[in-house]
Image (cartoon, rainbow, N blue to C red):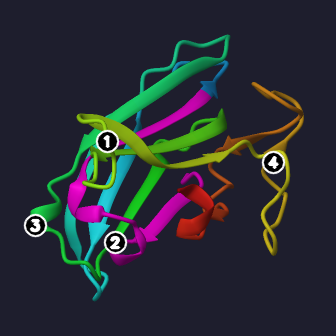
Amino acid sequence: EYSVTVKKQISSIKDFANIKEVLFGFSANTQTPIKDAVVVMSIDGPDGKSIEWIGKEIAIKPGSWQQLEFSFEVNSDKINKDANIKLYVWDKASEDFFIDDLRVIVNGLVSSRMLSSGYIPERNIEYDFEVPLEGESNEFYSDKNAHSGKFSFLLNSAAAYSPSVTKKVSEII
């Protein structure tokens, strides 16, 4: 039902005050039309209560792998540094489809340390499901239908939880 969740505490994201946009992309494949799935960006306060929740409908044509990318505008002025930002795919109808090659790109204003101007991708996360994350079950990693490499992640009614991708800030900048 839920995909891998990318979760970061706002205070751990370098120069968060300069962030203007988060891009969340992945490859997806299904054999049947998907009726009710969304890509979600949520921001939760330190108490776990939702501050902001944005869902964007996923449209996947059956039969082949497609590259999908979703843009979420961020207003960092309204977000507490102790809040958490989460990105995930929610398969609300518990239909079978595969995702692979997950990407998160955080775009923001160039910091004063930079000599150029405009927007640049400064903080990126990629995950291709080739190796199960440490301590996670590989039960829903599938070698039957991969976009790149040997594995993808199967979303269905049995996959209620999935691995979380957590990276140190120093690993993505």
| CA distance for labels 4 and 1 | 43 Å
Name the residue beneath numbered marker 1: 115
Whether 173 is drawn above or below 168: the answer is: above
Q: Amino acid at mark 3?
A: Lys
Dot 2: few (<14), some (14–19), or many (≥20) neighbours within 10 Å? many
**In the current view of this chain or complex, which residue is farthest to the front?**
115
Q: Secondary structure at mark 1?
A: loop
Q: Say which label, 4 or 1, has the lower sequence index.
A: 1
Q: Which label is found at residue 141?
A: 4
Name the residue beneath numbered marker 2: 10
Query: With 53 as the anchor, is 145 left or right in this view?
Result: right
Tell whether label 3 touches label 1 (CB within 8 Å): no
Q: Say which label, 3 or 4, has the lower sequence index.
A: 3
Q: Which label is found at residue 78?
A: 3
Q: Say which label, 2 or 4, has the lower sequence index.
A: 2
Tell me, yes or no, if residue 166 can be seen here: no
Is 29 or 35 nearer to us in this picture?
Answer: 29
Query: Magenta part of the protein: which range?
Result: 1-27
Based on the displayed image, in which of its 4 quarters is residue 52 positioned?
bottom left
The residue mark sitting in front, 1 or 2, is: 1
Dot 1: few (<14), some (14–19), or many (≥20) neighbours within 10 Å? few
The residue mark sitting in front, 3 or 4, is: 3
Q: Position of residue 169 (x, y in %)?
A: 53, 67
Q: Amino acid at mark 4?
A: Tyr
Residue drawn at x 54%, y 54% is 2
Magenta region includes residue 72: no
Residue drawn at x 25%, y 54% is 112
Q: Secondary structure at mark 4?
A: strand
| CA distance for labels 1 and 2 | 25 Å
Tell whether label 4 touches label 2 (CB within 8 Å): no
